[in-house]
Amino acid sequence: EVQLVESGGGSVQAGGSLRLSCSGAQYPASYVCMGWFRRPFNKEREGLAAIDSDGSRSYSDSVKGRFTISYDKAKSTLYLEMNDLQPEDTAKYYCALDLGWGPLNGGVCYGGGDGMDYWGKGTLVTISS
């Protein structure tokens, strides 16, 4: 059973950086896609970045150039390096894993947010101006 646990959230000032981690991202299949999502307060969930086991990456326009997704297979840990954080980045951030195959697009795995098979419980990121 895959159990994803996010960490690394916190409060920083605008322009600052954070690195989120998602442990437990191990998988039995030959292909997997992993992604980061966020849900600001009273807003819809947004896909941010995705990476698959072939090394392909995809980012949403809202974070492209500021956020970097990576995966350490030896540690079974997914990361999201976030730079130049702004107040609009304030949200709860989630990692998720999708065992289905397909091209990444716009920062999400092929099946999109609804197609993810496993989710973590999230970590809160708060950016002050």
Image: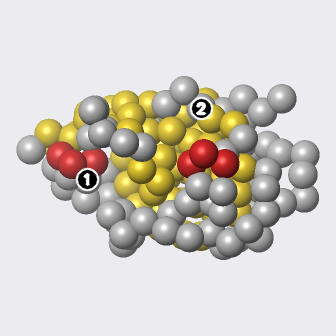
Q: Position of residue 51 (x, y in %)?
A: 63, 62
Residue 71 in view of the camera: no
Q: Is 1 on the left or on the right of 63, as rendered?
A: right
Labels in figure, total: 2
Q: Position of residue 18 (x, y in %)?
A: 37, 46
Of residues 65 and 119, which is closer to you in this image?
119
Of residues 15 and 95, which is closer to you in this image?
95
Of residues 80 and 103, which is closer to you in this image?
103
Q: How was the colour assigned to the protein in this rendering?
A: secondary structure
Of residues 84 and 1, which is closer to you in this image?
1
Give the crowd class for mark 1: few <14, some 14-19, many >=20 residues within 10 Å.
many
Q: Position of residue 28 (x, y in %)?
A: 90, 46
Are discs 2 and 1 less than 8 Å apart at CB?
no
Q: Nearer the viewer, mark 2 or mark 1?
A: 2
Counting residues from the N terminus, which is met first, the one under dot 2 or under dot 1?
1
The secondary element bearing badge 2 is classed as loop
Give the crowd class for mark 2: few <14, some 14-19, many >=20 residues within 10 Å.
many
Assign the C terminus to one quadrant of the image: top left
Assign the N terminus to one quadrant of the image: top right
Q: Residue at x 72, y 41 (%)?
A: 117
Residue 89 in view of the camera: yes
Q: Is 30 on the left or on the right of 91, as rendered?
A: right
Residue 48, image quadrant: bottom left
Whole-angstrom CA distance, mark 2 to mark 1, is 22 Å
> Residue 126, relative to residue 85: is it above or below?
above
The amino acid at mark 1 is Leu
The amino acid at mark 2 is Gly
Residue ID for mark 2: 120
The mark found on residue 85 in the picture is: 1
